[in-house]
Amino acid sequence: MEAWPTVARVLLLTTIADWLKAAQSRDFTMKDIILLHPSTTPHPGAFKCFTCQDAADNYECNRWAPDVYCPKGAKYCYTQHTMAKNGDSVSVTKRCVTMEDCLFAGCVMSNSYQVCSSCCEGNICNLLVPRNDSSAVFSSASPLASSSRRLHPAVLSFIISFFIAGNV
């Protein structure tokens, strides 16, 4: 009977170690997101979008998005979110696009999946994924920078970590 407390301790310590490892990964990602403004840009008006192809969900997309500037002709950030009937993410695709790629924003049913797409204008404005017709829009303002006031870095860090952690 004395083995059970030992097994319970090992399981608890394993869970805590996994949680700490995940927390460290999120901190690393958070630092990358906050440091998206280097001192030089490749061309005037250059900006960045989260970019990924067929990621499992929004967290995986934003976590592994390369930190590169959009090409000169691209003016918008595009997001396509495919969901199962229960609302779970099937895939997320994000990229830099031109206006032609933003002509359709909204949701459609396709092969028993709901596919929502949106476009936005602004640096890393495609943090969130569209989940329904009210969020699948073409927006000329970033959801994080739509007010004229600047966010304190600690507040911005909290907002980004909240959405990246999958609470969207």
Image: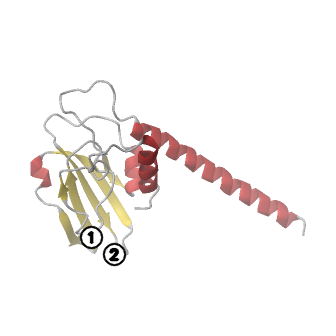
Viewer-proximal residue, 87 or 34? 34
Q: Quadrant of residue 103?
A: bottom left
Residue 19, image x, y percentages: 61, 53
Gap in angstroms between the C-alphas marked 1 and 2: 7 Å
| Residue drawn at x 47%, y 55% as measured from the top left | 165
Colouring used for the render: secondary structure
- Give the residue number, with chain letter if any, for mark 1: 114
Residue 118, image x, y percentages: 22, 58
Q: Classify residue 78 as left or right of residue 50.
A: left
Q: Classify residue 133 as left or right of residue 160.
A: left
- Give the residue number, with chain letter if any, for mark 2: 85
Callout 1 secondary element: strand
* Mark 1–mark 2 CB contact (< 8 Å): yes
Quarter of the image for the C terminus: give it.
bottom left
Residue 107, image x, y percentages: 21, 68
Vertical arrangement, residue 167 with respect to residue 19, above or below: below
> Mark 1 packing: few (<14 Cα in 10 Å), some, or many (20+)?
many
Q: Which mark is residue 158?
A: none
| Residue drawn at x 27%, y 69% as measured from the top left | 132
Which badge, 1 or 2, comes first in the chain's sequence? 2
> Mark 2 packing: few (<14 Cα in 10 Å), some, or many (20+)?
few
Vertical arrangement, residue 124 with respect to residue 6, above or below: above
| Residue drawn at x 35%, y 35% as measured from the top left | 36
Q: Classify residue 104 as left or right of residue 135.
A: left
User: Which amino acid type is shown beneath numbered disc 1?
Assistant: Gln
Vertical arrangement, residue 68 with respect to residue 105, above or below: above
Quarter of the image for the N terminus: give it.
bottom right
Callout 2 secondary element: loop
| Residue drawn at x 28%, y 48% as measured from the top left | 125
Find the residue positioned furthest to the front. 149
User: Which amino acid type is shown beneath numbered disc 2?
Assistant: Lys
Q: Quadrant of residue 33?
A: top left
